[in-house]
Image: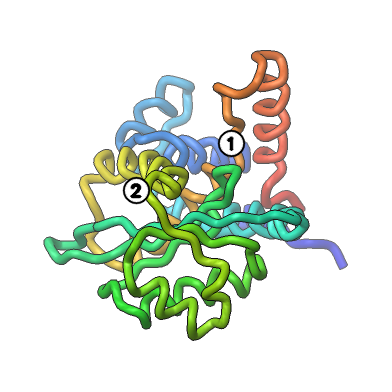
Amino acid sequence: MTKRSPFRYFKTSPEIIRLAVLMYVRFPLSLLNVEYLLHERGVDVSHETIRFWWNRFGPLFAAEIRRKRASRMRCYSNWQWHTDEVFVKINGVQHYLWRAVDHEGEVLESYVTKRRDRTAALKFLKKAMKRYGQPEVVVTDKLCSYGAAMKVIGNATRQETGRWKNNRAENSHLPFRRRERAMHRFRRMRSLQKFISVHASVLNHFNQDRSLSKRDHFKHNQTAALAEWRGLGAA
């Protein structure tokens, strides 16, 4: 059975839609910024059209990226997770964004909650483990909610805490913080959950650790990632 193209009802070419979504999600740009940049390239669209494209195709592209990467990431023999939570305000009310990254800096899971207790930590860990399986080690901070949730799951012996051990998770918050400032924060919990899920997938897709690679190797990986992006959603 032939896969139906998600672009079949759109007059705009898929290349322009993918470019608009990429610019908005990957870089700290507003919808108006993306509109201006596309206008310079001869593409006349409004920022509301870009908003519609992002809401329609962003989750679709992210799901396709995750589907291609999830099976490969399960093969690690010494998989180590780093988990941490970020304070996020939504309409002036403080919420918590739980995030898990692995030892290579891949963002595994992001989950927004109103509280920072054992129930929230348990939901977050179960959601991540359902998708990626059990890690060998889970590095956390000294929040008691992690220990209580790990006891319920039955892998309390895999938890590690310590000073500077969780720097991998702390540093992974920086791209989100830059994006949050560009968007002037979020207004709804649902919008934050949707955006951070897509943002994490796109960040993983183009994250090549430039400081650890030679220029030729880095350029080759970037070209391959961009070529794979241009094929997302293809029939």
| Distance from Cα at disc 2 to Cα at disc 1 | 26 Å
Residue at the limit of the structure toward the left, as seen here: 92
Q: Position of residue 149 (x, y in %)?
A: 44, 79
Q: Which residue is mark 1?
A: 206
Taking the image as shown, residue 164 lies to the left or right of residue 204, namely left
- The residue at the point 73 percent across, 60 percent down is 74
Q: Which residue is situated farthest in the right direction here?
A: 1
Quick check: can you spot residue 161? yes
Instruction: Determine the secondary structure under disc 2.
Output: helix
Residue 16 x/y as whole percent: 56, 36
Q: Nearer the viewer, residue 193 or 15?
A: 193
Regarding residue 50, the answer to whether it shows in the image is no
Image quadrant in which you'd find residue 206:
top right
Mark 2 vs 1: CB contact within 8 A = no
Report x, y in % for residue 173.
38, 45
Q: Is residue 42 above or below residue 187?
A: above
Residue 86, quarter of the rendered image: bottom left
Q: Quadrant of the N terminus?
A: bottom right
User: For this view, does 64 lie left or right of residue 17?
Assistant: right
Query: Residue 14's quadrant in the figure?
Result: top right
Could you tell me how many numbered marks the image carries?
Answer: 2
Q: Amino acid at mark 1?
A: Phe
| Crowd around label 2: few <14 · some 14–19 · many ≥20 (10 Å) | few
**Point 40% across, 80% down: residue:** 148
Instruction: Give the number of the disc on residue 48.
Output: 2
Q: Residue at x 22, y 61 (%)?
A: 187
> In terms of sequence position, does the residue under pointer 2 or pointer 1 come before the other?
2
Instruction: Look at discs 2 and 1 and give the one toward the viewer.
Output: 1
Q: Which structural element holds mark 1? A: helix
**Would you call the spot at circle 1 few (<14 residues within 10 Å), some (14-19), or many (20 or more)?**
some
What amino acid is labelled 2 in the image? Glu
Residue situated in front as seen by the camera: 41 or 64: 64
